[in-house]
Image (spheres, grey):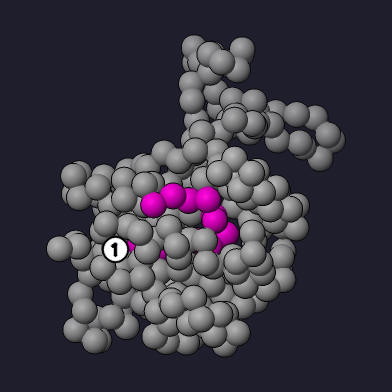
Amino acid sequence: MKPGILAIIPARGGSKGVPRKNVRLLDGKPLIAHIHAAASRSRYIGRLILSTDDEEIAEVGRSLGMDVPFVRPGELAREFSLLPGVSKHAMMFCDNLGETYEGIMSLQPTCPFLSTDSIDKAVETWMENQCDSVTSVSEITKGHPYIAKRVKQDLSLESFSPIPEGAITSPRQKREKAFFLTGGLYLRNRRLLETPELKGHCLGADSRAVVVSELEAVDINTEIDFKFAELLMSRQSEEA
């Protein structure tokens, strides 16, 4: 018996950095196919939905066997629309069908290397800790917060944020590890989405991490990102 996890793959049609990227071919498959394949192998996801406002994306999704039960409203498909709102819309759609899910997960198609193992680890972390949310993070390997700078109007530099007293700033190998949100995976308790107004990442007071590899953290937002992902995919195919 799978626990009550609803997973949403958000794929709007109005991408600007890489036009039509959600259906662009990566390793011979539409981009949305990669995260769908990983999520479909999860031991825990009860329902997996493609949320899109775009009919072409919906048709491609259906051809891949994806569940596309609705057209996402236009106000939730703008450039600056918040992803928690997209998750809430899918959750309420299922609620209205009598399907109640306690965990609501969003999985970005722009992170095509995210693994089934990481997806399942996120759910296990959520269940074991009874926390508000779990999100994917990866170690910052360049631009550590201790060396981040602000360039002022006169081009002078200052630390972007205060460095803790006694912190080791160099060499790199001795710095405290820092992590960033990859954006690939967010798992939230449904109560976080039941509030009338959703703000920010909507992670609640107790948010946990699933640490993913540098490869799984690859996020496609530009043409260079896409070319890099193509190179990584070809390398994987050669090694298989």
> Residue beneath label 1, please?
45
Instruction: Decide whether residue 108 is among the magenta residues.
Output: yes
Q: Would residue 39 be found to the left or right of residue 224 on screen?
A: left
**Structural crowding at the residue carrying mark 1, measured as other residues with C-alpha within 10 Å and reported as few (<14), some (14–19) or many (≥20):** many
**Could one spot residue 54 in this view of the protein?**
no
Quadrant where the N terminus sits is bottom left
Q: Residue at x 20, y 75 (%)?
A: 100
- Label 1 sits on a secondary structure element that is strand
Amino acid found under the numbered disc labelled 1? Ile
Residue 79: x and y in percent read 62, 71
Quadrant where the C terminus sits is top right
Instruction: Decide whether residue 166 is among the magenta residues.
Output: no
Task: Judge whether 198 appears above or below 163 on screen.
Answer: below
- Picture quarter containing residue 202? bottom left
Q: Magenta stretch?
A: 105-116
Magenta stretch: dominant secondary structure: loop
Q: Residue at x 59, y 25 (%)?
A: 146
Q: Residue at x 31, y 50 (%)?
A: 120
Residue at the farthest left position? 1
Residue 106: x and y in percent read 41, 63
Q: Residue at x 59, y 30 (%)?
A: 141
Number of on-image labels: 1
